[in-house]
Image (spheres, grey):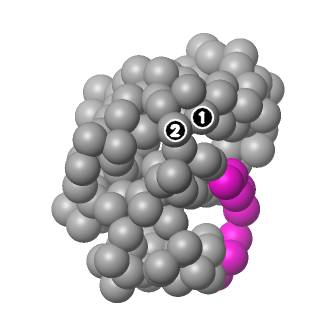
Amino acid sequence: MKKILVLNGPNLNLLGVREPDVYGTVTLADIEREVTEYAAERGASVDCFQSNHEGALIDKLHEARGAYDGIVYNPGAHTHYSYALRDAVSSIDVPTVEVHLSDISAREEFRRISVIAPVCVAQIKGKGKEGYKEAVDVLLAR
């Protein structure tokens, strides 16, 4: 059975409350439940982790080596500037798909660049919670 880590970065714990006009009313718990069920239907297991702290996310990425077959990762604001997280993704041999609920390329100028996407196998943006499921499909197809 394939094992997938669903990793969420800063402020994603506030989904459903934070800027519902941008991110919708779905909560992180809703996303985690749905992606876990979706993966299970496809023969994969999912573990979920969220942190507002860069170091905790780096530690989780390091721990993924040898423990997971793939990572679905929404780095939140870290997308645009965290070279430490970029290096953590590139340092492990675990295929990672970057996911964003909103279409970051259609938002503010500073949100349009991802320093993490170049070290991921794919980037999915602007598909809401369905993007997480698409990321699972990308990983399972590898």
Classify 74 as above or below 92: above
Residue type (three-letter) at the residue carrying disc 1? Ala
Can residue 111 be spotted in the picture? no
Q: How many marks?
A: 2
Q: Position of residue 98 (x, y in %)?
A: 38, 49
The spot of residue 136 in percent (x, y) is: 43, 39
SS at circle 1: helix
Label 2, on which residue?
43
Judge whether residue 48 is colored magenta.
yes
Write down the quadrant of residue 95 in the picture: bottom left
Given residues 39 and 28, the one toward you in this image is: 39
The residue to which callout 1 is attached is 40
Q: Report whether 112 appears left or right of 15.
A: left
Q: Secondary structure at mark 2?
A: loop
Extent of the magenta region: 47-56
Vertical placement of 80 versus 22: above or below? below
